[in-house]
Image (cartoon, rainbow, N blue to C red):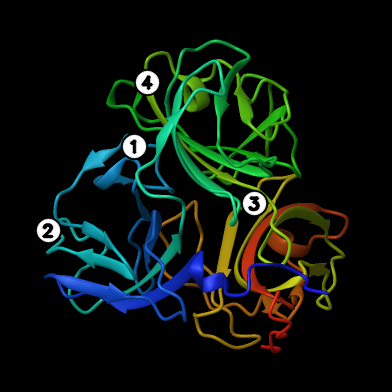
Amino acid sequence: MAYTTINDSTAYFQTKLFTGNSSTNAITFDGNTNMQPDWSWFKRRDGANGHSAFDSVRGVTKLISPNQTAAEQTVSDAVTSFNTNGFTLGSDSNNFINDDGLSYVAWNWKANGSGSANTDGSINSTVSANQTAGFSIVSYTGNATSGATIGHGLNSVPQMIITKNRDQSSASQDWCVYHVGVGANKGIFLNLTNSPDTNAKYFNDTTPTSSVFTVGNNLGTNGSGDDMIAYCFANKTGYSKFGSYTGNGNADGTFVYTGFKPAFVIIKRSDATQGWLMWDSKRLGYNPDNNHLQPHGSDAEGTADTLDLLSNGFKIRESGAGTNGSGASYIFMAFGQSLVGSNNVPCTAR
């Protein structure tokens, strides 16, 4: 029997490495199936430049930075188009993502284009949803009302929601994250190393449903009259998983079963102050040399041998507090290639 119907994860998620040229730069993905991205997240690998994110709902000229509190910026010469199998960059006069000769990585997810109206919640939203892959982009206008609900379009319960107040009138707002491993009575912040803040003002202490998520009255999730964006994720067997694990404080670290070969992993300690860490299967591309970046910071790529990406999960290879403190709690998000799909073809070990 098939393990999952997602035979080719590259139809829904792609990591792309490229070199900038400060000019028109058409980037084509490497997978077997064409994928037009709807959310692209960029980071320079070889230097201390910040993160940059663009999506098809807000439009390709609208930049927000996952490691910063700044409001959305309009930049006409960074991403100029999302294409049928990649994206095109412009001259990038501000050197966000295409500086000549520099090395970059882009993580890319497929939703469903520019989105459509959703009236499932008490706040109307514009939603670009890919129910097959469990990913949606949600744009809405906040009303500062505790208990307000927003439709997410997934037809399944989100396990992770990343929100950002992108409005210039409420600049300097943190990226507020709901994660199933932390719970709806807390907020955790993508741009910070802080431990979770226990407060219902973020997600109203209300677990998301298959149709809506609930927000409190915090500016980061529901600023009055402010333009908000949310990236919503649901577990999909054999392709994506959002969960938690407990560290063992040993260099022969915890193994986390995902049920697929991870192509992308983010980890955050959830019971103490520690940074976010992210890996993918393209940099450098073999165990144990899986270089990391930090969603909360602008640092260049780190080279510590922290984890192995295996055929059915990931295994921590250090005893550090950031990934494997003894008895410490961690949350993660992961995407990857199915063990066995509907074509009954197994993936290979890394």
> Residue flagged by tag 1: what amino acid is it?
Ala
Q: Name the residue under label 4.
A: 226
CA gap, disc 3 to disc 4? 30 Å
Earlier residue among tags 1 and 3: 1
Q: How crowded is mark 2: few (under 14 residues within 10 Å), some or many (20 or more)?
A: some
Q: Mark 2 points at which residue?
A: 93
Label 3 element class: loop
CA gap, disc 1 to disc 3? 22 Å
User: Is 275 or 283 nearer to us in this picture?
Assistant: 283
Q: Name the residue under label 3.
A: 274
Q: How crowded is mark 4: few (under 14 residues within 10 Å), some or many (20 or more)?
A: many
User: In which quarter of the view is residue 183 placed?
Assistant: top right
Earlier residue among tags 3 and 2: 2
User: Is 255 or 306 nearer to us in this picture?
Assistant: 255
Q: Which residue is drawn at 68% across and 42% down?
A: 156
CA gap, disc 3 to disc 2? 34 Å
Q: Which of marks 3 and 4 is in front?
A: 4
Earlier residue among tags 2 and 4: 2
